[in-house]
Image: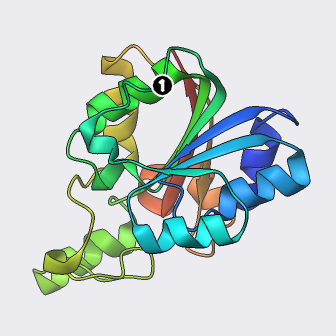
Amino acid sequence: MNTIEVIKNWIDKESEVLDLGCGDGEIISILSKEWGSRVLGVEINQDDINKCIQSGLNVIHQNIDEGLGNFSDNSFDVVIMSQTIQVLREPKKALQEVTRIGNESIVTIPNFGYWTTRINLLLSGKMPVTGTLPNTWHDTDNIHLCTIKDFENLCSECGINIREKCFFNKFGKESVLAKVVPNLFATTAMYKISK
């Protein structure tokens, strides 16, 4: 399965979904059209907001780092934060907020502990540029690099339950190696979490 298939498996049809850092709206578009979900996107990039609006998607302009106090507790069935937490100033606070706002949350992270990333850093002595980390260190949005172990430890520290998890290889598919030793062989991890 790929990431969107896993998301659809983890979300009931016709759920109310908030997507934080929705980008161009790919996920909420699929959930709206194929799953009948009532969706709202939150995005800071104006070009992405315009794409969402042109696609007929509900989206608001908001900086997640400035807080999510405009959303009440348990106001959505599911909150999605896909490939967003590592670009935020306060990922711990954001994680606490998504679990406050949603009955369940789905968080997807890039794994900076992936074996080729480790080898590139070891051999070159420089921050790696890879398919999943395509920008140089000075031109990346990623400000909080973490591994799968780091993320799971943060969830434990915050009293957040990991209800399900899925690990993907560099092709965006589940694999045996990624499942058995995810911190080394998964490029991306997806978690279904709740308080």
* Amino acid, disc 1: Phe
User: Percent x, y for residue 76?
Assistant: 64, 25
Q: How is the image coloured?
A: rainbow
| Side of 119 where 170 appears, left or right | right
Residue at left 17%, top 83%? 123
| Side of 186 where 66 appears, left or right | left
Residue at left 69%, top 57%? 57
Q: Determine crowd level at label 1: few under 14, some 14-19, many 20+ residues with C-alpha closer than 10 A.
A: some
The correct choice, above or below, for 7 with respect to 112 in the image is: above
| Side of 194 where 149 appears, left or right | left
Residue at left 38%, top 68%? 115
User: Percent x, y for residue 56?
Assistant: 73, 62
Q: Residue 67 lies in what quarter of the image?
A: top left
**Residue 175 in view of the camera:** no
Q: Which residue is mark 1?
A: 71
Using the image as rendered, state which of residue 22 and residue 4 is in the foreground.
Answer: 22
User: Percent x, y for residue 16?
Assistant: 73, 32
SS at circle 1: loop
Number of marks in the rendered image? 1
Using the image as rendered, state which of residue 182 and residue 191 is in the foreground.
Answer: 191
